[in-house]
Amino acid sequence: MKKLLVVGGVLISSILVTGCASVGNESLRKESEASVSQKIVQGKTTKNDIRSMFGSPTKTTFTDGGLEIWNYDFSNVSADAISYVPIVNLFGASASGKKKELVVMYDQADVVKRFSMSESDVTHKTGLFNN
């Protein structure tokens, strides 16, 4: 009986720990397309302004013309109900939630030339039957 209680406790704990996951830049957690549009003004907001609002970018790239592009992303997902079914979750589990992405392009003077904020639904699937 003690073994059963211990095993049950471990299973419940692991389910609770793996229920939710957030990945990426936490400063985007509460942001939306509308709120970012109020904070960033094309032709006025500087690279230093963006860094103070959102921190360092997740990724930096450059255009063929040499303009710098900063990418920020944030994902927040929760395990779907099927993930909590014993045995079944060994063969396939899934998690769904939201992904936010902010892309900022700067001109030669380090001022925002263009930006885009998007939010989309995401689903992550694992297991034998989800490949």
Image (cartoon, rainbow, N blue to C red):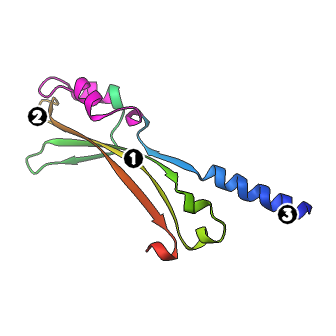
Pointer 3 or 2: first along the chain: 3
Whole-angstrom CA distance, mark 2 to mark 1, is: 33 Å
Mark 2 and mark 3 in contact (Cβ < 8 Å)? no
Q: Which residue is mark 1?
A: 98
Label 1 and label 3: CA atoms lie apart by: 37 Å
Name the secondary structure under disc 2.
Answer: loop
Q: Residues within 10 Å of mark 3 (few under 14, many from 20)?
A: few
- Residue located beneath label 3 in the image: 4
Q: Amino acid at mark 1?
A: Lys
For image coordinates 36% across by 32% down, the residue present is: 55
Quarter of the N terminus within the rendering = bottom right
Q: Residue at x 14, y 28 (%)?
A: 42
The answer to whether one can see residue 104 in this image is no
Nearer to us: label 3 or label 2:
3
Locate the C terminus and report the quarter of the image it occupies.
bottom left
Question: Residue type at mark 3?
Answer: Leu
Q: Nearer the viewer, residue 74 or 98?
A: 98
Asked whether residue 48 is drawn in magenta, I would say yes
Badge 2 density bin: few <14, some 14–19, many ≥20, Cα 10 Å: few
Magenta span of residues: 27-51
Please name the residue that numbered disc 2 is placed on: 108
Image coords of residue 85 (percent x, y): 63, 64
